[in-house]
Image (spheres, rainbow, N blue to C red):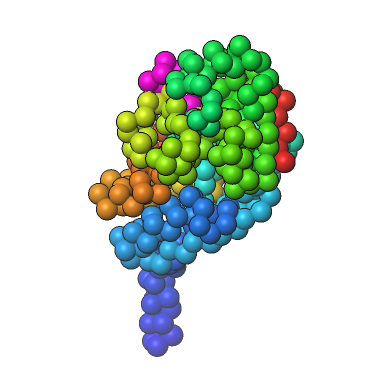
């Protein structure tokens, strides 16, 4: 009888997989170093998500290979909802820039939802006699190749944004790549280079001190960090978007129920006033949305950046 009772107990005790989700710690892999925009975003969402789901959320930084190492790890993880990916639009630009990547940006993941937008600003050294996009374009056309634009390196979002801008307007500006943002910004402030796309919150202190002039802030929408500065769309450029998006994804095959649960909680977190204020101070605009929204963003960017990279013959550093 004792053996029968023990057997009966073993039958009714559910396994971890049968328990309501989630029932043990969730790991969010960030394929970049601590302190980056996506890392800050992942840790803020992770902390709030942990409070709401009542499980530990561990942020696991796995930088390397332009984000491919951590990204690949998620694409090959079990589809159980306990390994997630916090990433940026580099998920797509890496595919356009590199001969091969160890993941498929569409088939290799389950979209959970977008999380934020990082606006890029088009800035010029005050020595440039242009106060609007139209004036900058006219100047570049009058002096083809004479205006230099900086980037933190070939294939960076700053570089891709400038090349998309060039292609859109049919202008010739000379690319000067640097090994990181610090040298590029230093030379931009000194006038050795004249033009650059920079994250709005990075550019703003230099604009406020009069060392740079901001022509636009944001692609399709104005930046909340600089609401008085026109977006590219405000300047009539409605068919290009240079902003960086951030998102949460899971491995392929994540269940619909898990996706819905995670998406609902993350959107609620992003709509929280205190969270929004914290992110906006970091130059990030919260972007709650659906898995379908994220799927469209990935597909649109894949087409856009593949075309830009081919046309401009860009190679990543």
Position of residue 185 relative to residue 231, above or below, is below
- Residue 257's place in the image compared with 6, above or below, is above
Q: In which quarter of the image is the C terminus?
A: top right
Q: Is residue 137 magenta?
A: no
Residue drawn at x 44%, y 27% is 215
Quadrant location of residue 311? top right
Q: From the top left corner, tell me how far across and down residue 297 is, in percent.
A: 48, 31
**177 relative to 105 in the view: left or right:** right
In-image side of 83 versus 115 (left or right): right
The span shown in magenta is 233-241
- Measured as percent of width and height from the top left, residue 138 is found at 54, 13
The residue at the far left in this view is 273
In the rendered image, the residue lying farthest to the bottom is 2
Q: Can residue 183 be seen in this view?
A: yes
Relative height, residue 300 to residue 116 (above, below): above
Question: Residue at the location (59% across, 34% down)?
Answer: 191
Q: Position of residue 60 (x, y in %)?
A: 53, 61
Q: Which quarter of the image is occupied by the N terminus? A: bottom left
Majority SS type along the magenta span: loop
With 26 as the anchor, is 264 left or right in this view? left
Q: Can residue 21 be seen in this view?
A: no
The residue shown at (32%, 33%) is 227
């Amino acid at each position: 009888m004792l053996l029968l009772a023990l057997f009966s107990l073993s039958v009714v005790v559910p396994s971890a997989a049968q328990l309501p989700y989630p029932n043990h710690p969730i790991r969010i892999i960030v394929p970049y170093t601590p302190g980056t925009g996506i890392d800050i975003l992942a840790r803020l969402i992770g902390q709030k998500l942990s409070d709401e789901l009542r499980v530990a959320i561990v942020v696991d930084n796995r930088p390397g290979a332009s984000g491919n190492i951590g990204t690949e790890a998620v694409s090959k993880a079990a589809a159980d909802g306990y390994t997630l990916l916090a990433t940026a639009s580099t998920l797509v630009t890496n595919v356009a820039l590199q001969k091969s990547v160890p993941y498929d940006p569409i088939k290799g993941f389950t979209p959970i939802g977008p999380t934020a937008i990082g606006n890029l600003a088009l800035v010029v050294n005050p020595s440039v006699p242009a106060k609007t996009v139209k004036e900058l374009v006219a100047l570049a056309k009058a002096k083809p190749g004479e205006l230099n634009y900086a980037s933190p390196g070939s294939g960076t979002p700053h570089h891709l944004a400038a090349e998309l801008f060039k292609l859109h307007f049919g202008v010739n500006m000379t690319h000067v790549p640097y090994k990181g943002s610090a040298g590029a910004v230093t030379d931009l402030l000194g006038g050795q280079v004249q033009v650059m796309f920079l994250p709005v919150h990075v550019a703003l202190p230099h604009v406020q001190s009069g060392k740079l002039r901001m022509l636009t802030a944001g692609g399709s929408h104005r930046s909340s960090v600089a609401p008085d500065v026109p977006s590219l769309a405000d300047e009539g450029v409605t068919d290009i978007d240079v902003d960086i998006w951030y998102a949460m994804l899971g491995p392929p095959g994540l269940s619909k129920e898990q996706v819905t649960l995670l998406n609902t909680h993350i959107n609620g977190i992003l709509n929280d006033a205190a969270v929004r204020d914290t992110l906006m101070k970091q130059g990030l605009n919260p972007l709650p949305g659906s898995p379908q929204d994220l799927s469209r963003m990935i597909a649109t960017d894949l087409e856009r950046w593949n075309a830009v990279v081919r046309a401009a013959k860009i190679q990543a550093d």
